[in-house]
Amino acid sequence: MSVWRALAGRGYLRSAWPWRAVAYLAGGALLGAVVLVVVLGGLVVGGALAVVLLGLPLLVLTALAGIPVAAVERWRLRVTGMGPALGGGHRVPDAPGLWAWLVTRVREAATWRELAYAVLLGLVLWPLDALVLFCALGIPLSMVAAPVFLALDGEAKAVKLWTVGTWPGALGVAVLGLALLATGAYALGVVAGARAELVRAVLGAKEDDGERVLHLVRSRARLVDAFEAERRRIERDLHDGAQQRLVALTMSLGLARLDVPPGPLADQLAKAHTEAGQALADLRELIHGIHPKVLTDYGLEAAVADAADRSPVPVDLDLHLPERLPQPVESAAYFVVGEALANVARHSGANRAAVSGGYGDGRLTLHIRDDGRGGTGLTGLADRVSVLDGTLSLSSPPGGPTLLRVEIPCRPRPSTDPCA
């Protein structure tokens, strides 16, 4: 149950919420005083030593002071029951090490939001917490204790404003103090609830649209890279393992045919030899579809030329790439061309196709044309291109011709790239 629902109920004064509010505000006052000393001390000492560069690390630490302060505030919110656990909203650094952590934190909006809250806590919030505790708790308790002061000192001062010297007066002040104490318990609940809402609003995990989109794009790019690496691994395993065994098996069956005289056994060996050869051809086709070796060894231009030669529909090729492009770009572009040509052969009814394009102005451009009626199944291609911040557009009027245009921003591989 939240503090607001407790305040609206009849059993608030008998519940634990007034004590939680006192603990929350008292902790906030103590934490704020400490934060004020630490932040002001860091700024003063760091600013004084900045002229000799010794204060710069201290200033950086002071700028990051909001991170532990926010962590303590989230912990207090949960422990005192003033709200659910809050996430920090900080991103995981892209690389290990202190420098990567510092760069990530400095670039995050959450870090500066937490620093702003720490400054607000040190300058404004903790004095308010202390003032509310004094007015709603300290003053009524001092009034309730009026009979005790009267018994000890012979007189009691109510709120430091007037002196009570009689027992009826002291008892009246005590009764008034109890009434104010009950009223103050509600005030404490309201203020503590408002403080908790402020913490949730400022320190709750937030991620603006730009950060969210960037995070999603990076996640998709990492998935694509992992997928491509796995494709290459499977291709190597099949090429170096299963394919070599099938080649050896085919050769052994061929040699066995030469040593066996004509007859049923020779016919069976011939059939097995043919089947093994067909399995080897199918496996090579499968390996080529997973990740063609020509793409890894010779680049996109050679791989597209190979795909054009293998296409059932004649393909005119006009692609010029003087430099190797990044592996993800080459892989995406190759599979776009391959799938587009397969789509032409299966669905378009075209008699001829053409692939053209090149690299210029910081982007790879490809055009795949055919004289047919177009086809389907381009959603996966668009997703593959969009991961690389590229675009894919299709023009396919009724009756054809069909034009598929792909643009992927990229830069050529460095000359020192071992894969170049």
Image (cartoon, rainbow, N blue to C red):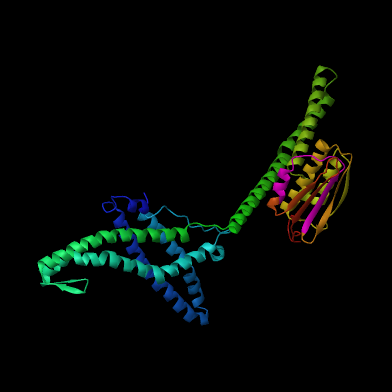
- Decide whether residue 365 is among the magenta residues: yes
Foreground of the two, 188 or 272: 188
In the displayed structure, 383 sits above or below 205; it is above
In the displayed structure, 248 sits above or below 12; it is above
Residue 147: tell me if it is visible: no
| Region rendered in magenta | 363-385
Tell how many labels: 0
Which percent across, then down, holds residue 358? 83, 55
Residue at 81% x, 17% y is 264
Which of the image's four quarters has the C terminus? bottom right
Residue at 48% x, 79% y is 47
Q: Determine the image quadrant of residue 137.
A: bottom left
Foreground of the two, 223 or 37: 37
Foreground of the two, 134 or 416: 134
- Decide whether residue 293 is among the magenta residues: no
Which percent across, then down, holds residue 68? 44, 63
Which percent across, then down, holds residue 217? 64, 53
Residue 60: tell me if it is visible: yes
State left or right for residue 87 relative to residue 188.
right
In the displayed structure, 12 sits above or below 352; it is below
Furthest residue in direction top, as rendered = 264
Residue at 73% x, 35% y is 245
In the displayed structure, 382 sits above or below 82; it is above
Foreground of the two, 4 or 296: 4
State left or right for residue 147 relative to residue 315.
left
Which percent across, then down, holds residue 259? 83, 24
Q: Determine the image quadrant of residue 91.
A: bottom right
